[in-house]
């Protein structure tokens, strides 16, 4: 509501996004939205690139220059003769997303490694088994093996081998040159200055991207790069292997644990049944013994009464 007038505006821009209001009675007219309404039609942005006249319903243009986003902020300046002056665009690579992607990879890796470290740790602060605070997966070989494999991959130089030809695939970079380092616990860190320097030193976004992941081959795709080892390792733990008829190491262990739990529950049920039967048997035996004891006491009392009577008769 502006100055006692109802104002409607469209979120969508451009000449094709026009607001219209209609009603079957006089509601629209009573609100000032009928024939008396004042309307301002939307317009498309008009621009020219390399001599081509183009239009856009939005001021944010993503399809004019491949890989670039152009935002129109106003009208071009005019020359002395009244014609519109040319505008020069300086297109540069936005490397912030690349830095963020590397940092995200490091953070996700560290979260996984910290989880594995916490759950497989062995407390060496005491020899008392009751006081030791070991991780719940201290004896789990799969968890320990996964931790070792990830730590080994983390310190690799990012040089991959073509699985078909055996050829070394070297991007010309190493993880160290990109500022990635790993401590003795397998925790990874990233030197932001080194990474920025590697990007600025002319390596190119494509070169750095290929260091982490790239594919070769037109028909049979071969994957290469720093992260491919992590992907392949994680897949063996999480995805089915139909060739070897497994559900993946983690799922196989979950199935094995579920089966063991089921067997233990069955053993507990059997033991409870046997205990209940044994309890009933013991109750019956003790009841019989108790009845026999009562009978014996009655007989002893009767014998004692006989002796007392006999003594009295003498």
Image (cartoon, grey):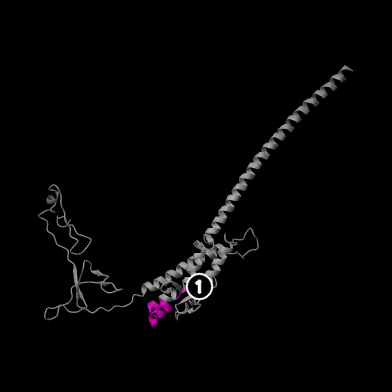
- Indicate yes or no whether the magenta region holds residue 188: yes
**Count of marks, rendered view:** 1
Q: Residue furthest front?
A: 219
Which percent across, then down, holds residue 262? 58, 50
- Indicate yes or no whether the magenta region holds residue 111: no
Residue 109 or 145: which is nearer the viewer? Answer: 145
Q: Residue furthest right?
A: 314
Q: Residue furthest left?
A: 36
**Rendered image quadrant of residue 38:** bottom left
* Residue at disc 1, secondary structure: helix
Q: Residue furthest top?
A: 313
| Image quarter in which the C terminus is found | top right
Q: Residue at x 61, y 45 (%)?
A: 269
In the drawing, does residue 34 fall left or right of residue 60?
left
Q: Which residues are magenta?
A: 187-208
Which percent across, then down, holds residue 240? 50, 61
Give the main secondary structure, helix, strand or loop, of the magenta stretch: helix
Disc 1 target residue: 154
Residue 305 or 239: which is nearer the viewer? Answer: 239
In the drawing, does residue 278 fall left or right of residue 81?
right
Which percent across, then down, holds residue 109? 48, 68
| Image quarter in which the N terminus is found | bottom left
Q: Residue at x 39, y 71 (%)?
A: 100
Q: Residue at x 42, y 71 (%)?
A: 103
**Rendered image quadrant of residue 14:** bottom left
The relative height of residue 303 versus residue 11 in the rendered view (above or below) is above
The relative height of residue 267 versus residue 98 in the rendered view (above or below) is above
Which percent across, then down, holds residue 303? 82, 24
Count residues near mark 1 (Cα–Cα under 10 Å), then give few for <14, some for 14-19, many for 20+: many
Residue 223 or 57: which is nearer the viewer? Answer: 223
């Amino acid at each position: 509501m502006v100055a006692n007038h109802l104002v409607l505006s469209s979120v969508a821009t451009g000449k094709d996004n026009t607001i219209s209001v209609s009603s079957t009675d006089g509601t629209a007219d009573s609100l000032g939205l009928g024939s008396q309404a004042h309307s301002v039609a939307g317009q498309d942005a008009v621009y020219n690139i390399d001599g081509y006249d183009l239009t856009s319903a939005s001021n944010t243009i993503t399809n004019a220059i491949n890989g670039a986003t152009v935002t129109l902020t106003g009208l071009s300046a005019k020359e002395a003769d009244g014609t519109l002056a040319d505008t020069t665009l300086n297109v540069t690579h936005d490397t912030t997303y690349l830095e963020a992607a590397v940092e995200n990879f490091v953070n996700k890796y560290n979260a996984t490694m910290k989880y594995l470290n916490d759950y497989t740790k062995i407390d060496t602060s005491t020899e008392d088994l009751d006081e030791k605070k070991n991780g719940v997966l201290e004896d789990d070989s799969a968890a320990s093996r996964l931790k070792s494999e990830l730590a080994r991959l983390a310190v690799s130089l990012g040089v991959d081998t073509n699985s078909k030809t055996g050829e070394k695939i070297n991007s010309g970079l190493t993880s160290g040159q990109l500022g990635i380092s790993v401590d003795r616990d397998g925790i990874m860190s990233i030197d932001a200055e080194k990474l920025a320097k590697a990007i600025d030193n002319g390596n190119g976004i494509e070169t750095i991207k290929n260091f982490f992941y790239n594919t070769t081959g037109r028909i049979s795709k071969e994957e290469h790069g720093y992260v491919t080892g992590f992907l392949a390792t994680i897949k063996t733990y999480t995805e089915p292997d139909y060739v070897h008829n497994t559900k993946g190491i983690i799922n196989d262990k979950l199935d094995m644990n579920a089966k063991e739990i089921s067997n233990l529950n069955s053993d507990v049920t059997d033991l409870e049944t046997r205990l209940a039967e044994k309890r009933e048997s013991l109750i019956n035996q003790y009841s019989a013994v108790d009845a026999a004891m009562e009978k014996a006491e009655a007989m002893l009392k009767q014998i004692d009464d006989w002796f007392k009577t006999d003594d009295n008769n003498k």
